[in-house]
Image (cartoon, grey):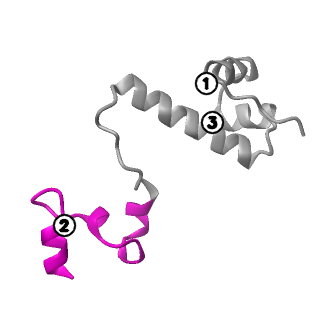
Amino acid sequence: MVERLVIMAPRDVIGPENLPPPLRPKEALAGAEEVQREKTLKEAREAFERAYILAELRAHDSNVTRTAEKLGIERSHLYRKLKGYGIAPSKG
């Protein structure tokens, strides 16, 4: 396995992200999304924020008020973000 890691690792240093998922520490899996380095910082931040908002909406059954409370923002601010990202919260 070590030989395979040395061959397959994209850099000179092998980290937990190079291990097969069953062998990765839980901390490495939490942030395991591949960083898309061809994006600008603004684009990457917006992509993360959109995905985060969608995940929180799902976790709160599309309840905008509870989602806004969890995110620590005003409900009106969340509605502006939803509109900006083209997200329509489902009607319960």
Q: Callout 1: 10 Å neighbours few (<14), some, many (20+)?
A: some
Q: Amino acid at mark 2?
A: Met
Identity of the residue drawn at 57% across and 33% down = 50
Q: Is residue 26 left or right of residue 41?
A: right
Q: Is residue 75 left or right of residue 24?
A: right
Of mark 2 and mark 3, the one earlier in the sequence is 2
State the quadrant of the C terminus.
Answer: top right
State the quadrant of the N terminus.
Answer: bottom left
- Residue under label 1: 85
- Residue under label 3: 53
The Cα–Cα distance between marks 2 and 1, rounded to whole angstroms, is 37 Å
79, 87: nearer the viewer: 87
Identity of the residue drawn at 65% across and 39% down = 54
Q: Is residue 75 magenta?
A: no
Which dot, 1 or 3, sits closer to the camera?
1
- Residue under label 2: 8
**Disc 1 element:** loop
Which dot, 2 or 3, sits closer to the camera?
2
